[in-house]
Image (cartoon, rainbow, N blue to C red):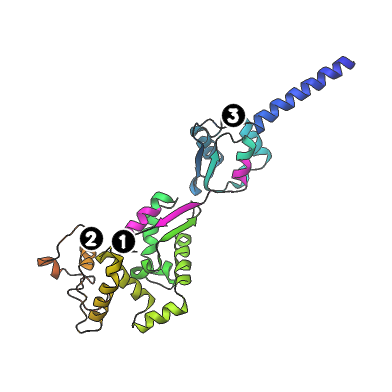
C-alpha cells in the first residue's frame, strides 16, 4: 500500500509537471523575437482567432490554448485589436493578454502630408479602418462639426507630431487626438498673436503651409512670410504663390509655374483669386 501511494504521488508530480509545461511553458513556434496578432472587429470569432494563432505559429498546442481559453471564458468577449506576442510566451500568458485586451499601442507619425487622400492612405496602412473610411470622415461636414471645423479646413487641426493609438481606432477617434493637440497648441497668447496679424488660427495654418512648400530653408521663412502678409494686405490681395497652383493641379513635381497653368480654374489659384486659399496645402 505504501509503495502504491509513493507511485501515485510520483505520477501526480509528473502529471503536474507535464501540465505545467503544457500550460506555462513556451508555446510559440515563430523564430522572430515577437509576432503581431491582429483581431479584426468584423472577425472577432473563435474560429478566426484560432486560425490566425495557428497560421502565424503563435501557438503550437491548439488543445492547450483552447482548454485555457474555455476555462478563462475568453471566447465570450473577444476584444479586437493588435496584440504583440513575445517569443517563448506560454499559452496562459497569451490567453490572459487577449482576454484582458492588452493591446500594443500604434505609433502614428505625421510629418508632411499634402492632401487628405495622402493622410487617408497612411491611416489605411497603419490602422484597421481603411483609407476610404478615413477620407469619408475628413470630407463629412456632419462628422467634423463636433470638432468645430469643415472639410476644407480639416487638415488645419493636424500638427506634425507622433501620436499614439490602438490599431482598431476608428476615424473619429484618430481625428480627436489631432484636434486635442491642436487645441492645446493654440494658447490664448498664440491666438492673440494671430489676431494681431489679422488672421485666425486656421488662416495662420494655411499661410504656414504655403511657406512650408515654398522653401525648406528655415532662415528664409520669415522673409517669405513677410512678403505674403504684405500681399494679403495690399489690393487685389493676390498671393501669387507657386505652391498653391501645384496643389490646385495635384502635380507636386512642377518646377516652373508659367503659361496656361496660371489661368487654371481653382480656388487654390492664388494668381487668379485674392486672399488665402480655402484650406492648407500641406501639414
Q: Tags 3 and 1 in contact by the CB under 8 Å rule?
A: no
Q: Which residue is mark 2?
A: 250
Question: Tag 1, which secondary structure?
Answer: loop
Q: Tags 2 and 1 in contact by the CB under 8 Å rule?
A: yes
Mark 1 burial class by Cα count in 10 Å: few <14, some 14-19, many 20+: some
Tell me what residue is drawn at x 40 percent, y 72 percent: 149
User: Which quarter of the rendered picture does the C terminus lie within?
Assistant: bottom left
Q: Position of residue 3 (x, y in %)?
A: 87, 15
Tell me what residue is drawn at x 23 percent, y 68 percent: 244
Label total for image: 3
Earlier residue among tags 2 and 1: 1
Tell me what residue is drawn at x 43 percent, y 66 percent: 143
On screen, 100 above or below 231? above
The answer to whether any part of residue 200 appears in the image is: yes
Question: Tag 2, which secondary structure?
Answer: loop
Q: CA distance from mark 3 to mark 1?
A: 47 Å
Q: Which residues are magenta?
A: 95-123
Earlier residue among tags 2 and 3: 3
Tell me what residue is drawn at x 36 percent, y 56 percent: 120
Question: Tag 3, which secondary structure?
Answer: loop
Earlier residue among tags 3 and 1: 3
The one nearer the camera, 146 or 273, is 273
On screen, 200 above or below 120? below
The answer to whether any part of residue 210 appears in the image is: no
Q: Quadrant of residue 268?
A: bottom left
Q: Which residue is mark 3?
A: 61
Does the magenta run of residues contain 262?
Answer: no
Q: Which residue is mark 1?
A: 115
Does the magenta run of residues contain 103?
Answer: yes
On screen, 154 above or below 61? below
Comparing labels 3 and 1, the label whose residue is closer to the camera: 1
Q: Quadrant of residue 261?
A: bottom left
Amino acid at each position: 500500500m505504501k509503495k502504491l501511494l509513493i507511485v501515485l504521488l510520483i505520477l501526480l508530480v509528473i502529471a503536474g509537471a507535464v501540465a505545467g509545461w503544457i500550460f506555462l511553458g513556451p508555446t510559440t513556434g515563430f523564430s522572430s523575437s515577437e509576432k503581431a496578432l491582429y483581431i479584426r472587429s468584423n472577425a472577432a470569432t473563435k474560429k478566426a482567432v484560432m486560425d490566425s494563432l495557428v497560421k502565424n505559429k503563435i501557438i503550437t498546442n491548439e488543445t492547450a490554448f483552447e482548454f485555457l481559453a474555455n476555462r478563462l471564458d475568453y471566447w465570450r468577449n473577444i476584444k479586437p485589436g493588435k496584440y504583440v506576442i513575445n517569443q517563448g510566451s506560454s499559452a496562459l500568458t497569451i490567453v490572459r493578454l487577449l482576454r484582458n485586451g492588452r493591446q500594443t499601442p500604434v505609433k502614428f507619425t505625421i510629418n508632411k502630408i499634402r492632401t487628405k487622400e495622402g493622410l487617408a492612405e497612411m491611416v489605411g496602412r497603419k490602422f484597421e479602418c481603411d483609407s476610404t473610411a478615413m477620407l469619408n470622415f475628413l470630407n463629412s461636414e456632419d462628422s467634423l462639426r463636433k470638432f468645430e471645423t469643415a472639410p476644407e479646413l480639416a487638415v488645419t487641426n493636424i500638427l506634425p507630431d507622433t501620436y499614439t493609438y490602438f490599431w482598431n481606432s476608428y476615424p473619429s477617434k484618430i481625428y480627436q487626438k489631432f484636434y486635442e493637440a491642436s487645441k492645446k497648441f493654440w494658447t490664448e497668447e498664440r491666438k492673440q498673436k494671430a489676431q494681431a496679424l489679422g488672421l485666425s488660427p486656421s488662416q495662420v495654418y494655411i499661410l504656414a503651409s504655403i511657406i512650408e512648400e515654398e522653401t525648406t530653408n528655415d532662415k528664409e521663412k520669415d522673409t517669405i512670410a513677410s512678403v505674403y502678409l504684405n500681399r494679403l494686405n495690399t489690393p487685389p490681395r493676390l498671393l501669387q504663390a507657386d505652391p498653391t497652383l501645384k496643389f490646385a493641379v495635384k502635380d507636386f513635381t512642377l518646377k516652373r509655374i508659367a503659361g496656361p497653368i496660371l489661368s487654371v480654374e481653382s480656388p487654390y489659384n492664388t494668381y487668379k483669386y485674392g486672399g488665402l486659399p480655402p484650406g492648407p496645402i500641406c501639414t
